[in-house]
Image (cartoon, helix red, strand yellow):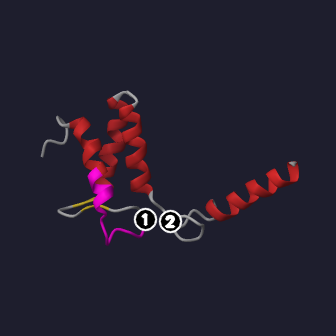
């Protein structure tokens, strides 16, 4: 059993955590989507908004594209997603006083 467990971890590490560049593993780099989901989950669970705010501000500054939305992640800047943008708006609604414009 130990051998299978070791092989399983090796497989996951090789497929997902290799080089940390987009497309080199089995997953694309969805940094904005993942960050939106984590931020939303933290806010829904009652986390301190002041601790989440810097994360949201970073997403708005680095990921949000003027008049288009936010993309899924790295190498997807050309195609902002409606679902990513919609959930970002849900997260931003927790900070109405900060992002009123």
Nearest to the observer: residue 101 or residue 33? 33
Q: Which residue is mark 1?
A: 74
Give the residue at x 83% y 54%.
4
Q: Is residue 101 magenta?
A: no
Which label is found at residue 82?
A: none
Instruction: Give the dominant element type of the magenta stretch: helix, strand or loop.
Output: loop
**4 relative position to 95: left or right:** right
Please identify the quarter of the rendering in which residue 14 is found: bottom right
**22 relative position to 18: left or right:** left
Q: Are marks 1 and 2 in contact (CB under 8 Å)?
A: yes
- Position in image of residue 75 (x %, y %): 41, 70
Give the residue at x 19% y 38%.
98
Give the residue at x 21% y 64%.
68
Please identify the quarter of the rendering in which residue 24 is found: bottom right
Q: Is residue 78 above or below residue 73?
A: below
Nearest to the observer: residue 46 or residue 24? 46
Looking at this view, name the residue that lies furthest to the left: 101
- Position in image of residue 2 (x %, y %): 87, 48
Give the residue at x 75% y 58%.
10
Please identify the quarter of the rendering in which residue 92 is found: top left
Callout 1 secondary element: loop
Which label is found at residue 28?
A: 2
In this picture, which residue range is highlighted in magenta?
74-86
Number of the front mark, 1 or 2: 2
């Amino acid at each position: 059993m130990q051998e299978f467990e070791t092989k399983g971890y090796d497989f996951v590490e090789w497929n997902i955590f290799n080089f940390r560049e987009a497309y080199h593993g089995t997953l694309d780099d969805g940094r904005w989507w993942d960050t939106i989901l984590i931020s939303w989950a933290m806010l829904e669970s009652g986390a301190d908004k002041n601790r989440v705010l810097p994360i949201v501000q970073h997403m708005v500054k680095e990921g949000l594209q003027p008049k288009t939305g936010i993309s899924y992640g790295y190498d997807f800047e050309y195609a902002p997603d409606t679902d990513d943008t919609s959930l970002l708006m849900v997260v931003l609604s927790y900070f109405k006083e900060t992002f009123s414009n």
